[in-house]
Amino acid sequence: MIVKVHMLAFGEPGEIREVEVPDEERSGSLLDQVFYFGQNDFQPQRHPSVSVGDVIEVEDRLVRYHVVAMSGFTPINLEQFNEFKALPQQDRHFHKFCTGRED
């Protein structure tokens, strides 16, 4: 399975990394597996490794977005994704989607 990751933490504007989660490895949380296989230690690419502040796009019957947070993942909708993407790159790490804090 190929999963798109929007490289909003350290990537260039519009940069997307395609992370392959091997079928034989599919068990448990898909988001955890995308994070694991999105590291250049396991799947070297010209993109940065998947990091806090990146957005994983999961497409099944619906398209769902999940921000890689400091602890886990924060589900967001398309409108929130577009607002998050519009933030200056250096501010995304401190956003409530990444920190889990509301203040």
Image (spheres, rainbow, N blue to C red):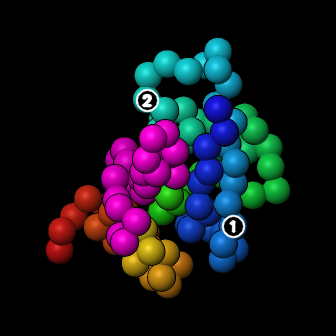
For this view, does 76 lie left or right of residue 23? Answer: left
For the magenta stretch, what is the residue range?
57-80
For this view, does 46 lie left or right of residue 92? Answer: right
Category of crowding for the residue at label 1, using alpha-carbon neighbours closer than 10 angstroms: few (below 14), some (14–19), many (at least 20): few
Of callouts 2 and 1, the N-terminal one? 1
Q: Can residue 25 be seen by looking at this rendering?
A: yes
Category of crowding for the residue at label 2, using alpha-carbon neighbours closer than 10 angstroms: few (below 14), some (14–19), many (at least 20): few
Locate residue 60, reporting x and y percent. Answer: 49, 39
- Of residue 37 and residue 81, the one placed in the foreground of this image is 81
Q: Which mark is residue 29?
A: 2
At 48% from the left edge and 82% from the top edge, which residue is drawn? Answer: 86
Q: Which mark is residue 66?
A: none
Locate residue 75, reporting x and y percent. Answer: 34, 53
Of all residues shown, which one is farthest toward the top? 24
| Quarter of image, res 2 | top right
Q: Is residue 63 magenta?
A: yes
| Quarter of image, res 24 | top right
- Of residue 23 and residue 9, the one placed in the foreground of this image is 23
Q: Which residue is mark 1?
A: 15
Q: Can residue 90 be seen by looking at this rendering?
A: no
Relative to 73, residue 79 above or below: below
Locate residue 82, reporting x and y percent. Answer: 44, 74
Relative to 67, residue 94 above or below: below
Location of the N terminus by quadrant is: top right
Locate residue 33, reporting x and y percent. Answer: 54, 32
Identify the secondary structure beneath mark 1. loop
Numbered marks: total: 2
Name the amino acid, label 1: Glu
Identify the secondary structure beneath mark 2. loop
At 75% from the left edge and 38% from the top edge, which residue is drawn? Answer: 43
Name the amino acid, label 2: Ser
Location of the C terminus by quadrant is: bottom left
